[in-house]
Amino acid sequence: MVPQYPTCTPRMPKRHYALALACYLAIPAAMIAGVGLFNLIDPEMARSHADYVRDYRLLELARRGVLIAVAGLAVILWAATCHLVIKARQRSPGWLVLAAAGPLGFSFIAMLKDRSPAPGDAYQRFIGTLKIYWRVALEIAVFVSVWFLAYESVVLKRELMIRYESFTTGTPVATIIDRQNASSGMWAFSEGLAVLYLVVLIYLLWPIVFNLAGRLLGPRTTPTHPDPRNSGD
């Protein structure tokens, strides 16, 4: 009889943590869909109707309703993201109050140690072995690195978009930059939102990347199989 040996399967993040990541990724999708629906509802479509004033107001109310619904959905998804991360870490729901502080509050939620880490969670095992002063130093370093990486990613994306527009349209780079500077407030607001979004996304991906790197770069152990000659019939 041939002995059966257990097969190794890749370890995935906790179900609640994976759901948190899915909820967070759904926020921009919901916003894009909501803005698209908002643009489709044009109050001027009421011109062909007999009661123009009434239909115009209804369409305008529908547009505002779409914006309110999208904003509400984004808030729900954000709260769900924070709640699921806290639940995955086996922590008190009271930590959810930090969600009101946005990405800054989530930075502290992401620092919570998992009370019941999943098997093979190298990141939680690593931070669990650190002394308090090393843990504080690590979290400060991660905090600074995450915000720096998010900001630099947005800057890089801006530069690439400028170069791409210049290449496709033939417009000089200086002209594109001057046009953006003319509406600097709008660009600063949109890029600020992008930085805030990336901060949370990087925090969510950081333990996953750490564990993946640990499995790829760590020592590989070859399972030892028993000698069939030493087993009875």
Image (spheres, rainbow, N blue to C red):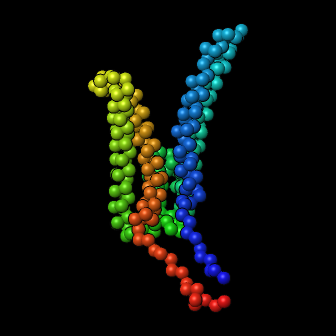
State the count of labels. 0
Please tell me which residue is depicted at 53% across the width and 45% down the height of the picture.
Answer: 25
- Give the quadrant of the C terminus: bottom right
Location of residue 39 with respect to 158 vertically, above or below: above
Q: Residue 159 at what x, y percent from top left?
A: 33, 35
- Give the quadrant of the N terminus: bottom right
> Is any part of residue 123 visible from this angle?
no
> Is any part of residue 119 visible from this angle?
yes
- Of 53 and 141, the residue lying toward us: 141
Q: Residue 42 at what x, y percent from top left?
A: 60, 19
Please tell me which residue is depicted at 36% across the width and 61% down the height of the picture.
Answer: 138
Farthest residue in the left direction? 174
Q: Residue 167 at what x, y percent from top left?
A: 34, 28
Q: Is residue 211 left or right of residue 136?
A: right
Please tell me which residue is depicted at 45% across the width and 43% down the height of the picture.
Answer: 197
Location of residue 70 with respect to 16 vertically, above or below: above
- Of 95 and 37, the residue lying toward us: 37
**Quadrant of the rendered image containing residue 131:** bottom left
Please tell me which residue is depicted at 52% across the width and 39% down the height of the picture.
Answer: 28
Farthest residue in the right direction? 50
Location of residue 217 with respect to 35 vertically, above or below: below
Q: Residue 55 at what x, y percent from top left?
A: 68, 15
